[in-house]
Image: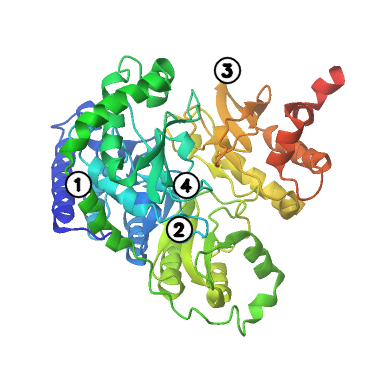
Amino acid sequence: MYQYSNFDHEFVAQRVAQFSAQVARRLDGSLSEEEFKPLRLMNGLYLQLHAYMLRVAIPYGTLNSRQMDQLAMIAERWDKGYGHFTTRQNIQFNWPKLEDVPDILQALADVEMHAIQTSGNTIRNVTADHFAGAAADEIADPRPIAELIRQWSTDHPEFQFLPRKFKIAVTGSPHDRAVTQAHDIGLRMTEQNGMRGFEVIVGGGLGRTPMIGKTLSSFVPLEDLLPYLEAVVSTYNLLGRRDNKYKARIKITTHEHGVAEIKQRVDAQFAKIKPMFFGADLQLLKDIERYFEPPKLKRANAPACAGQTVAQTTAFRAWLDTNISAHKVPGYAIVSVSLKKPGATPGDASAAQMRALAQIARNFGHDTIRISHEQNVILPYVHLADLPQVYQALRQANLATPNIGLISDIIACPGMDYCALATARSIPVAQQIATRFEELKLEHDIGPLKLKISGCINACGHHHVGHIGILGLEKAGVESYQITLGGDAGAEAEIGTRAGPGFGTDEIVPAIERLILGYLHLRADENESFLAAYRRLGLAPFKALLYPETKKAA
């Protein structure tokens, strides 16, 4: 993984010192909250319902054990003993005291971490495929490109006050695990005539106006990528609306002007910008790539699970079925660690669990940890022979839930329990759904299913691209939950269709139960997933399951 240069260390140290002085001025009253707001947002500090919240960047979701240990320390010393991993591959601390934030930022800097540009109308944390560098299906590791973009975008003088926040995702695989079509810019690595480059997708996004991104260029050679990105963002910076924040994202700009006009403007801007780079970006990329060499894999020919009695247990086999993915290196596996134990808060990890993950990564994972946009933790380099020991260590940390990709592996935003923007609670609904299907013992029979919950129209829970999406709203002082069906975040991304009227707090879990039990009867066979059945049958039979009284009345 990338290691800070002297410049990086000095830059982050200066930002910590600068913000420490700003916090001191806020505490002594020299700055009002209104004056302090833009300063704190530049450093990832929000004011939520009950307290400040600090959002820490985990660039392209990559951590080492030392950094995870430090996050655990921060959670214990300055928060309430836990952190919340987000759909942006960040971690949030929900309860820091303002006077402690400078010390937290210094503790982050000590392990080459920061909270810069995790908020504000700027280019946010660059996200990537959480299997990057290990996936069996990828063309190449996209993280060096993500790091190049991070360095280019950090404190970029032209892009600190964009019309609205701006999000970039990158994948090196045709199987899109980075939700590239729901980002302001999505980058998909591809090859053409033996040359590596990227399909560039623009104008994706969720929120109150969900849109699937459109291909701006089917192939941008690697050598042109950074100047091309600069052309896209500078074009948006000029065209993007600043009169209405709800219409300020690049998705609206692309929709209003049309992708053909945007492409024409970007191409013209690229022609001007390209000569200014002089190949410096390619030299920088070459320097970055050396940090992303795969680890020296150990015991490559060791027998899988040799001599481990745990390999015979039903629980271990269930975990292998759901939490293990194919690796590009024979003899190795990618381990997904679920942070979605039924009844728990999706995405939360205690300090003790963080330390356990750090130790497992040191012992069995080549000191490499990833955070997924699905709010889980990934160990991308685990030898098959070590899987029983990894499983046992995860069990001891209460992290061995075998549910990756199943109905209880729910993406959920913090909702009204924390967020000042939320209009309904997300966490309790997620907990109740997961607990109910654990009681029914049907998860593995149901099979792959992406259920996602947002507590407001801003869609931080990605509900629009859930196979089943739930949107919590407030109506006349009462929480109401709308259901969307048929969304997808993969290579064939699609916005879900609203099924009908919303459900009350006491109705939403029974409605989901009716829907799923009905699906089990509707599917063609046990191998047909929920999404496949929906695409085959359409909305009508699923809507009838959700609203049986309407069906009777008709």
Q: Earlier in the sequence, mark 2 or mark 1?
A: 1
Question: Element at badge 1?
Answer: loop
Q: Mark 4 against mark 1, which lies toward the viewer?
A: 1
Q: In this view, does 406 lie above or below 53?
A: below
Label 4 near label 2: C-beta < 8 Å? no
Say whether disc 3 or disc 4 marks the residue closer to the N-terminus: 4
Cα distance between the residues tagged 4 and 1 = 32 Å
Residue 373 located left or right of residue 496: left
Of the residues shown, which amino acid type is indicated by label 2? Ser
Kind of residue sitting beneath label 4: His
Q: Distance between the residues labelled 2 and 1?
A: 45 Å
Residue marked by disc 2: 350
**Mark 3 or mark 2: which comes first in sequence?**
2
Q: Residue at x 61, y 39 (%)?
A: 429
According to the picture, the residue beneath numbered tag 1 turns out to be 279
Instruction: Specify the label residue 476 is tagged with.
Output: 3
**In this rendering, position of residue 228 left or right of residue 550:** left
Mark 3–mark 4 distance (CA, rounded to whole Å): 33 Å
The CA distance from mark 2 to mark 4 is: 18 Å
Residue 184 image point, x, y percent: 39, 32
Image coordinates of residue 224 in percent, x first then y, are 29, 41
The N terminus lies in quadrant: bottom left
Q: Residue furthest front?
A: 193
Q: Which circle's residue, 4 or 1, is located before the other in the chain?
A: 1
Number of numbered discs overlaid on the protein picture: 4
Q: Choose mark 3 or mark 4, whichever is in front.
A: 4
- Residue on which disc 4 sits: 373
Residue at the image position 32 percent from the left and 20 percent from the top: 240
Quarter of the figure that contains the C terminus: top right
Direction from residue 71 to residue 530 in the image, left or right:
right
